[in-house]
């Protein structure tokens, strides 16, 4: 008998439906945005947004809306990947363990000949299903949409915009996970995780603009994933992704330590 | 580190034999509880509980609701960490996670509340459980217990969930099965089937440990009984002795003369008169009671199981302990012996 990742497989299977719906939703939204870009073509965006305060331009990542890359960066990546998916993965991470503790399903899972540490690894691994699906399927779909309106986008840049979102989303999911192992109620862990990621997003985009507090922005994971420059110029800092991965590992070790010690 | 189990990783595939030859030292009983204590600060859920369950016996863990039975079971499975004391489950110290995890491949567990994945079908859940711990006896068990495995679990009745729980608890042919209130939610017919089933399991060498707050159930199937009350083990007894001592609950509707004669019988305790008659616990000779009843004009009579809390009050001499939150013991028992 093999006991290789049955739990990850089973839990991953449970996430398939959610992953499909998420991917379909994100793809549909991206399609709409790309179509909208083709409709608005010819308008001078810099004029339109000139009136906005710089902090707001910064907050929404509005850099260059006249190109399809810039438009995608602002409307799809900054909005959906950075904020929407960040909150989504914090949310499902938050429910991952606390939900089972609440429903007492955890009693059954811990009666298996599987250590707590391994159970946690497998449960987290199941979160990778929607994370990979939305990028691996969403990416090509966005590319095809762009082609369909007669524009083009660098495949390499688009690929990196997706790939480098993974460390960021891992951190968001791990924030949820850390709350999830610490409390008994899924709704509390979910709310705490979503609130934390949202506040960090605001901290980076709003407070981060003020000089006196500029150090504070480095607390936010959003600081280390900037999709718009990747899309436009293909520029990114590898150290940013390393910082995110270190933060992810740290949060995961913290979750393990909390889960190992707690009473169920 | 318990040396017996350290070497035995993963569930066994080889112990099909009767009598269940195990990897644990043969002289070590499957369940040894030593001074197990769980202190939640406000509540002392388990207070220095010690007992041993021998190989191939059915051990009933009896106590009113809130006595701490589930706490003991959760400690045994490593869900909770003991404040003091310990226990060995198939030779594995419950404080040693690696050893306990290895031993769990040979343990079956039926929790009090079955938190199955509601969206999955029974089939999918059993597939998953089977993949993790083995499913050698799955088909055989599905002939005895018949949950509708093709349907999603959210459509299951409590009884169906319980049956699915029993299948998963036994399907890997464990040496030791731990069950928390296994018969709650089963109808009387299924309950009798369950009793027969666990007797057969015992006869083929499986050790069975289960908790219950129903005295009659424990009496019918258990070889030995431990009684937990307010977190402490108050009695460890053979079933016959318990049967002998617990008495019957009698409720009679009759005139005053009849009641006076009945309550004067030997073995009547805690008679409580009400407007039309009386009720009491009778622990004397059943023939004497029946003779006395036959001698009078009785309007109505009920003879049944005494509530478990009454058994405690009358036979262990103490009242409701502060921590034991019991639903059965609504009476303060101020007129008790």
Image (spheres, rainbow, N blue to C red):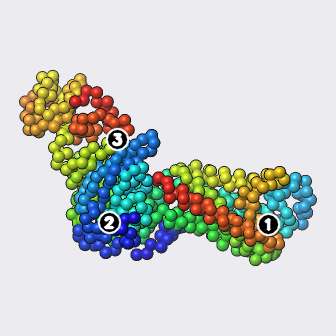
Of label 2 and label 3, which has the lower sequence position? 2
Which of discs 3 and 1 lies nearer the camera? The answer is: 3
| Residue annotated with mark 1 | A228
Q: CA distance from mark 2 to mark 3?
A: 31 Å
Q: Is residue B50 visible?
A: yes
Q: Is residue B149 left or right of residue B265?
A: right
Mark 1 vs mark 2: same chain?
no
Instruction: Determine crowd level at label 1: few under 14, some 14-19, many 20+ residues with C-alpha closer than 10 A.
Output: many
Residue drawn at x 67%, y 52% is: A196
Q: Are marks 3 and 1 on the same chain?
A: no
- Give the image location of residue B287, x and y in percent: 8, 38
User: From the viewer's perspective, is the residue at label 1 or at label 2 nearer?
Assistant: 2
- Which corner quadrant of the image does residue A181 belong to? bottom right
- Indicate whether B159 appears above or below B267: below
**The N terminus of chain A lies in quadrant:** bottom left
Label 2 sits on a secondary structure element that is: loop
Q: Which residue is rendered at x = 57% and y = 59% of the image? A: A255
| Residue under the image location 37 percent in, 65 percent down | B2
The residue under label 3 is B230
List x then y, in percent, for residue A189: 58, 52
Q: Nearer the viewer, residue B146 or B221?
A: B221
Q: Which residue is mark 2?
A: B174
Query: Is residue B24 or residue B257 the one in the foreground?
Result: B24
- Point out the frontmost of discs 2 and 3: 3
């Amino acid at each position: 008998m093999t006991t290789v990742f049955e739990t990850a497989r089973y839990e991953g299977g449970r996430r398939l439906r959610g992953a499909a719906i998420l991917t379909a939703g994100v793809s549909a939204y991206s399609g709409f945005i790309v179509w909208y870009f083709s409709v608005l073509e010819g308008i001078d965006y810099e004029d339109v947004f000139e009136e906005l305060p710089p902090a707001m331009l910064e907050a929404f990542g509005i850099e260059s809306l006249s190109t399809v890359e810039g438009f995608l960066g602002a409307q799809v990546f900054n909005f959906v990947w950075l904020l929407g998916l960040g909150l989504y993965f914090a949310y499902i991470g938050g429910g991952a363990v606390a939900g089972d503790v609440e429903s007492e399903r955890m009693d059954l899972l811990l009666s298996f000949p599987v250590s707590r540490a391994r159970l946690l690894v497998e449960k987290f691994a199941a979160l990778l299903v929607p994370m990979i699906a939305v990028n691996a399927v969403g990416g090509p779909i966005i590319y095809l949409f762009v082609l369909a309106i007669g524009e083009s986008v660098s495949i390499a840049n688009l690929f990196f915009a997706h790939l480098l979102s993974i460390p960021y989303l891992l951190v968001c999911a791990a924030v949820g996970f850390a709350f999830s192992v610490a409390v008994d109620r899924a709704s509390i862990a979910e709310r705490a995780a979503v609130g934390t990621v949202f506040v960090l997003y605001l901290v980076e985009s709003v407070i981060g603009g003020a000089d006196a507090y500029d150090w504070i922005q480095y607390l936010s994971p959003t600081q280390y994933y900037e999709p718009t420059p990747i899309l436009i110029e293909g520029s990114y800092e590898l150290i940013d992704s390393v910082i995110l991965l270190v933060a992810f590992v740290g949060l995961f070790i913290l979750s393990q330590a909390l889960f190992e010690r707690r009473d169920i | 580190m318990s040396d017996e189990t350290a070497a035995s990783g993963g569930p066994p595939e080889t112990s099909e034999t009767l009598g269940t030859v195990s990897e644990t030292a043969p002289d070590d009983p499957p369940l040894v509880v030593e001074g197990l204590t769980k202190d939640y600060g406000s509540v002392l859920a388990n207070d220095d509980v010690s007992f041993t369950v021998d190989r191939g016996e059915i051990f009933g863990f009896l106590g009113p609701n809130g006595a701490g039975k589930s706490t003991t079971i959760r400690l045994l499975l490593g869900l909770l960490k003991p404040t003091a004391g310990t226990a060995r489950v198939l030779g594995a110290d419950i404080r040693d996670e690696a050893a306990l995890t290895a031993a769990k491949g040979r343990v079956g567990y039926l929790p009090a509340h079955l938190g199955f994945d509601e969206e999955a079908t029974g089939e999918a859940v059993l597939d998953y459980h089977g993949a993790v711990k083995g499913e050698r006896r799955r088909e055989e068990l599905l002939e005895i217990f018949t949950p509708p495995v093709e349907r999603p679990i959210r459509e299951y009745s409590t009884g169906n969930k319980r049956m699915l729980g029993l299948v998963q608890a036994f399907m890997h042919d464990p040496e030791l099965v731990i069950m928390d209130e296994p018969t709650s939610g089963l109808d009387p017919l299924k309950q009798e089937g369950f009793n027969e089933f666990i007797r057969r399991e015992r006869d083929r060498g499986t050790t069975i440990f289960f908790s219950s707050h129903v005295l009659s159930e424990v009496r019918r199937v258990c070889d030995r009984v431990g009684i937990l009350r307010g977190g402490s083990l108050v009695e460890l007894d053979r079933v016959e002795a318990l049967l002998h001592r617990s008495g019957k609950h009698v409720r009679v509707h009759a005139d005053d003369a009849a009641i006076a004669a009945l309550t004067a019988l030997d073995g009547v305790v805690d008679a409580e008169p009400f407007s039309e008659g009386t009720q009491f616990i009778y622990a004397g000779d059943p023939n004497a009671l029946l003779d006395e009843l036959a001698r009078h004009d009785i309007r109505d009579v009920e003879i049944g199981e005494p509530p478990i809390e009454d058994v405690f009050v009358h036979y262990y001499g103490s009242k409701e302990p502060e921590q034991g939150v019991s639903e059965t013991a609504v009476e303060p028992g101020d007129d008790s012996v």
